[in-house]
Image: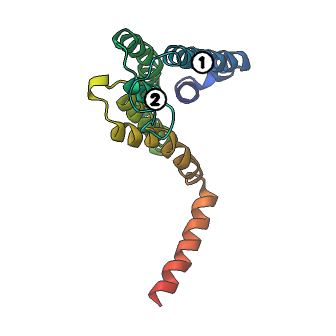
Amino acid sequence: MSFDRYVAICKPLQYPVLMRRSVCHMMSVGTWFWFTVQALTCSLYVLPLPYCKSNVINHYMCDYPALIQLSCSDNSAFERTIYVGNFLVLLIPISVILSSYIAILLQVLRVRSSERSHKALGTCMSHLCVVGIFYVTALLTYMTPASSYSPQEAMVNTLFFTVVPAVTNPFIYSLRNRDVLAALRKAFGKQIASVTL
């Protein structure tokens, strides 16, 4: 999405070539493939582990950091491997997203028209907010050393990066629609008028 916005704002004449269907398919397949490899690696490692502690997982879901806490084997090699995988899965995409938005910001600052720059920034800020919530909480969850792993913090972080972006997406993107905003103002205007009377 950030690359699409970058091309649309910074290279609008090249958009049909840079964002053709085959490029979009390639980016989607590459993303799905890499995340599948990462998830399979974690699953194949965690499944055969011997568990000698409680069989109750203190988490919303069966996530691998919670399972590793229950294991009684030495997982230091796996943790190092996972940190490298998480670095690739989390930090590379966030750096691409941030660099795209930095390029967009620099392009917008060069534009003299305040209306066009305001529209471009408004388009990008909603996406950047949702991405920020997702990636910051995911980084806090998956890049924390096992020695400082806290099940309570992990549950809160997991809730934030799984539920909050999904719930806020419709609101953020629909509130940018003028018709939706007009209907909300009209509805809340009636509410406020009835409360004050």
Q: Confirm whether residue 127 shows in the render.
A: yes
Structural distance between the alpha carbons of marks 1 and 2: 31 Å
Mark toward the start of the polypeptide (1 vs 2): 1
Residue drawn at 47 percent across, 19 percent down: 89
Which residue in the protein does label 2 denote?
104
**Depicted 7 relative to depicted 82: above or below:** below
Q: Residue 95, located in which quarter of the rendered image?
A: top left
Identified by mark 2, the residue type is: Ile
Q: Nearer the viewer, residue 14 or 174?
A: 174
Q: Residues within 10 Å of mark 1 (few under 14, many from 20)?
A: few
Residue 149 located left or right of residue 175: left
Residue drawn at 48 percent across, 79 percent down: 192
Q: Confirm whether residue 116 shows in the render.
A: no
Dot 1 lies on which element?
Answer: helix
Residue 127 located left or right of residue 144: right
Q: Nearer the viewer, residue 78 or 26?
A: 78
Q: Position of residue 14 (x, y in %)?
A: 63, 19
Q: Residue 18, located in which quarter of the rendered image?
A: top right
Q: Position of residue 27 (x, y in %)?
A: 62, 18
Q: Position of residue 79 (x, y in %)?
A: 37, 15
The quadrant the N terminus occupies is top right
* Label at residue 145: none
Identified by mark 1, the residue type is: Thr
* Label at residue 36: 1
Q: Residues within 10 Å of mark 2 (few under 14, many from 20)?
A: many
Q: Position of residue 175 (x, y in %)?
A: 55, 54
**Depicted 47 relative to depicted 156: above or below:** above
Q: Residue 160, located in which quarter of the rendered image?
A: top left
Dot 2 lies on which element?
Answer: helix
